[in-house]
Image (cartoon, helix red, strand yellow):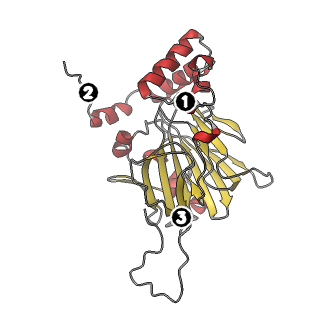
Amino acid sequence: LPVATVSEPSAVLAQYVYPKKALTAFAGFVAGNRWGPITTAIIRDFIRRYGVNMNEAVNSDPASYATFNEFFTRALRPEARPLAQAAYVCPVDGSISQFGAIERDQIFQAKGHSYSTTALVGGDAALAAKFQDGGFATLYLSPRDYHRIHMPCDGRLTRMIYVPGELFSVNPVTAKGVPGLFARNERVVCVFDTAHGSMVLALVGATIVGSMATVWHGVVNPPRTRKPREWRYDTQSVSLKQGEEMGRFLLGSTVVMLLPQGRIRFNPQWQPERRVHLGEPMGRPPDPVDPRRPVFGLTLNYAP
């Protein structure tokens, strides 16, 4: 007999009703506890259900992980993700949701939906202004993916902002159906100074994402506060090299990257919905403009 499926609109509408925070808290409780054989059975079922490639993991034995979170944030063998020789490398394993140019302050989410850089970074208009007409990339991490986030280029951390919010799913169906999704969900906004100017890596939470963590702070959430929290690193030296781990999701989600105007020409092979891997070429600075050449009809910024 054919299996009945839930339509996309129904799946989105249901998310406005069911208790997302309670489900997320329960998932975090289960994922963080040691259940012995039960944990191993959950991990084996997850690997089978989502087609996780354990051959790439440093530890490939599902029974050796004491908690589901240990399995979910498993390390990969260094040779599994070599770093390309590029100004920017892809910071995660996942798929491209969208990427390209920021239109003034608007980031394209999906057909019919955009959101502002100010909303994404938690209302800081001065910070958002650094990315006016800049570039962005939204990268979705599915359940089967490696869930650590790495640096696309060298950077020095200047700020971290926890922005409370909703916990909608961030899968492609929801991105098409929930306006302003990535500026609506809970997120951790990390601001870096780089050789190419300011850079934001925003870690976006979602349903059953038990927590988000960074290498310099540890777990940022929980606690889930009602008001934003901010940490400044002006007097501390938190510098990370290209390819180094900067954070991780305990259950999967999305990363949104922001760059200033004229700082990246994206990899011409990139397309929305394309699978990507940590370390592959993401882009390079645009070619310098020869002042002797006419610029009529010349595109100076981005070439997705």
Q: Nearer the viewer, mark 3 or mark 1?
A: 1
N-terminal label among 3 and 1: 1
Asked if residue 28 lies left or right of residue 94, the reply is right
Identify residue for label 1.
55
The amino acid sitting under disc 1 is: Asn
Q: Residue 66, how many percent across, how many down? A: 63, 18
N-terminal label among 3 and 2: 2
Helix, strand or loop at disc 3?
Answer: loop
15 to 254, vertically: above or below: above
Identify residue for label 3.
264
* Pointer 3 local density, CA inside 10 Å: few below 14, some 14–19, many at least 20: many
Among the 4 quarters of the image, the one containing residue 147: top right
* Pointer 2 local density, CA inside 10 Å: few below 14, some 14–19, many at least 20: few
Identify residue for label 2.
5
Is the Cβ of the residue at disc 2 closer than 8 Å to that at disc 1? no
N-terminal label among 2 and 1: 2
- The N terminus lies in which quarter of the figure? top left
Q: Which of marks 3 and 2 is in front?
A: 3
Examine the rendering and report whether any part of residue 107 can be seen.
Answer: no
The amino acid sitting under disc 2 is: Thr
Closest to the observer, 106 or 197 = 197
300 to 254, vertically: above or below: below
Q: Residue furthest top?
A: 37
Q: How far apart are marks 3 and 1 (CA)?
A: 34 Å
Examine the rendering and report whether any part of residue 75 can be seen.
Answer: yes
Mark linked to residue 204: none
Q: Residue 43, how many percent across, how many down? A: 52, 20
Q: Nearer the viewer, mark 2 or mark 1?
A: 1
* Pointer 1 local density, CA inside 10 Å: few below 14, some 14–19, many at least 20: few
Helix, strand or loop at disc 1?
Answer: helix
